[in-house]
Amino acid sequence: MVFKQRKVLWAAAAAAAVALTLTACGASSTDTTEGESVIISPVVVNPPSLNPLANETAAYMLRGQFYDTLVRLNATDLSVEPGLAKSWEASDDGLTYTFRLQEGVSWHDGEPFTSEDVKYNLTEAMQYYSPLATTYALISDVQTPDENTAVVSLSSPAGYFLSGLANLYISPAHIYAGTDIMANPAWNTPVGTGPFKFESFEEGQQITGVKNEDYWDGEVQADRIVNPVIPDRNARNVALTNGDVNLEFRDAVDPSQLPTFEANDAFQVAPMVGAPEELITILNQREGRPLADFKVREAIMQAIDRDPIIERAYFGAAEAAPSAIPRKIAWATNEDVDLSTQYPLDIEAAGKLLDEAGYPAGADGTRFSLKLVVEPSQQPASTTAELLASDLDKIGIDLQVQLTDFQAVISDVWTAPYDFDIYLVQTSTEADPSVLLSTLYTCNPNDIPYSNATGICDEDIDALFTQAAALSDQDERGELFREADAAIVDTLYSSLPIVVTASPVVAAANVTGLEDFYSSTNWNWAALGTK
């Protein structure tokens, strides 16, 4: 892979002003010792905890530094590769998986990692990580015939089981078993098997780790890793320019500055590979809501102009999403459907649909209002929200954009009374539609948080996802997913993507190991160093 080089030019006045923010964020405490290799990678929000089971942005970004998974996914083809499990065998009926674990692995506190840890995570801890709710529901039993073997029994075959496990970061049973796991204060001083050992967590300032000298998966290249909390994007840009940080990726990257970084050989930009990421709209279609009417959803789709979103929110690092299942999951996506073709940009047609739906324009041109919720930490998403507001204004919809933090999102989107119309969020779709996408499109009669929050149930689409989840043969599963993909586009059901993103990583030129860092969708933090 050849990395492009990018350049940044900042006005001195702007840099000085934003530097005040850096000081407030504690960036000055990231000074390094001469000869020490340190990776300094900012997070955009202060993490409520370092719990890898928390469905929260900062914890998601940091978990691979301290913890490991049983299996990993190859970033190029999304195939399953060894992690803490060095090998595995599946029974012919797909109901039993026997995992052979890496030997000689220790937790950071010196206790041995064993099959009992695997059992605890698969039978207890996993239930708290909502994106894996369907995977957890499959597990009927875990046996540990010896300390390096775990035998997992499933209630039904599931072709996505291993892909699901690639998202479960293993925590130590000797610390969490028998406790209220989500409330355990030990999460803020994490003990894992990962490449870095936890050193400190300064609330609102930074999280620091030191090299795990005994890491089971080879030499860790950096001596230390520092994650300063820098919510302000301008402050992050200045920090990278000035050398106060040396690695930014995902939400930390400011897309508007990519062209300037490209022109400076003091920086390198690597394209992000791995599981697809999309900007999606979760549509509240409960009875009485405007979006419950298909014609309203159709009108909105015909009013959205994706080109300005791609250029002004993502600065070219995205493309229009054709359907619910990304094209990268080639075996499952339906290439015969395309949202942009089926619902082409047409303001006049969109207005007529709203008339037909019984929403005439008032004297001021407004038909009705919708509430859109978005997290400001996801900068391209919040920029997109403003562009969507402009698009919908053209057809008489007053889109009221509410910028809110993750805790407020839980209240507005994921729990009753569901006070939103549209939730705009950038998320990974994972490597298999049964792992995450299924939670968006299958029925959710019990209103389980972080699942289908739209309040509707399409039994046919639900059945297609359910049947695909119960099969092991990828070709058979692909047929079902392609049918579901078409049905979602035809009915504009539940959640719809706007763009597929290509978030890059931006690093100082002296940072090494970027290719290996992205070799796994779990991010290989051990590979990063400096020269």
Image: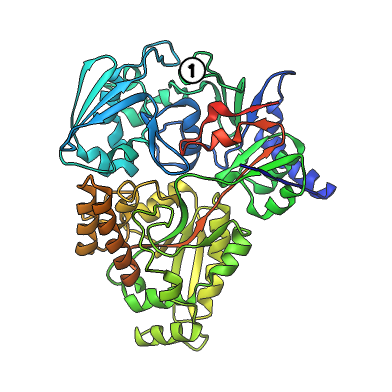
Give the residue pinned by disc 1: 215
The location of residue 185, given as percent across then percent down, is: 41, 25
**497 displayed left or right of 516:** left
Colour mapping = rainbow
**On-image quarter of the N terminus:** top right
Does 494 appear above or below 209? below
Q: Nearer the viewer, residue 296 or 305?
A: 305
**On-image quarter of the C terminus:** top right
Mark 1 belongs to which amino acid?
Tyr
Does 164 appear above or below 499? above
Residue drawn at the location 52% of the way across and 45% of the way down: 273
Q: Is residue 129 visible?
A: no
Q: Secondary structure at mark 1?
A: loop
Residue drawn at the location 46% of the way across and 32% of the way down: 49
The location of residue 435, given as percent across then percent down, is: 32, 46
Q: Nearer the viewer, residue 277 or 59?
A: 277
Q: Nearer the viewer, residue 297 or 157?
A: 157
Question: How many labels, in total?
Answer: 1
Query: Quadrant of residue 478 in the image?
Result: bottom left
Q: Is residue 243 visible?
A: yes
Residue drawn at the location 31% of the way across and 49% of the way down: 449
**514 displayed left or right of 531:** left
The location of residue 51, given as percent across then percent down, is: 42, 31
